[in-house]
Image: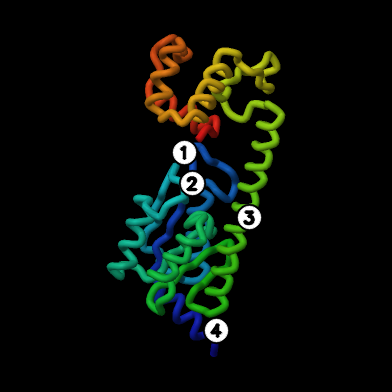
Amino acid sequence: MARTTRTTLEMTTRAIGYIRVSTQGQVDDGVSLSAQKAKLEAYAALYELTLVDIIVDAGVSAKTLGRPGLQRALGMLRKSTANALLVAKLDRLTHSVKDLGTLVEDYFSSDTITLLSVADNIDTRTAAGRLVLNVLGSVAQWERETIGERTTEALAHKRANHERTSLHAPYGFSVAADGKALTPDATEQALLDAIRDARARGLSQRAVVAELARKGFTTRKGTALSLMQIQRIMQHAAIA
């Protein structure tokens, strides 16, 4: 009886397929646009879904829900052109627990709109499917935050050991011959010291700029230092 009910639901489901890659050249197996499309079509055929359309966001990050393709798909759900959104994997839809919660609250918590994910075996028409959706979203968020913490720690370690952490050397340093280590730049370090001294004496940022000009400090190109440049230098050097 349960199987018959499920089959009836599936036959009446009109699904919008949504596929996405972050970069135009992304071709990893299981992530590329063609691979995602094939999975959606196979899933729709297996469960007898009516695949109304497959909408693409190519070269678009999942950091925001404001993606052209996704907004078009959501608009079709709102207009009842379809009653389900079908994705190959949940991370093609979003990487954010907050955004996922917004989508669930605004769309997939109702009995009329369904979220289907092939790889994650999610079907929000069932309580189990909704539970899996929330658990997977929380785990994904935890994983990203853990990676972020490790990256921050690694960069802090490099900075503490005067190692290069970006394409350009930070103000006050130059890249050593090995291309990795940083060596202090005497002129720029002197400017940083002058800024720290001026701020310690209570000078405003504008007054700091004027004092640096009087002392003969310039930009790397030999031009006059602007307030904006000094503010940026202070920010990068963590000078209050």
Horizontal side of residue 33 vs 50, given as left or right: right
Distance from label 1 to label 3 (Cα)?
Answer: 25 Å
Distance from label 4 to label 3 (Cα)?
Answer: 36 Å
Front residue of this view, candidates 234 and 95: 234
> Which label sits on residue 143?
3
Point out the tag, 3 or 2, that comes first from the N-terminus.
2
Residue found at x 55% / y 30%: 237
Distance from label 4 to label 2 (Cα)?
Answer: 35 Å
* Amino acid type, label 4: Arg
The residue that label 1 is drawn on is 24
* Amino acid type, label 3: Glu
Front residue of this view, candidates 186 and 81: 186
* Amino acid type, label 2: Val
The residue that label 4 is drawn on is 3
> Quick check: 221 above or below 46?
above
Residue found at x 53% / y 80%: 127
Point out the tag, 4 or 2, that comes first from the N-terminus.
4
Query: Which percent across, then down, holds residue 126?
Result: 52, 79
* Amino acid type, label 1: Gln
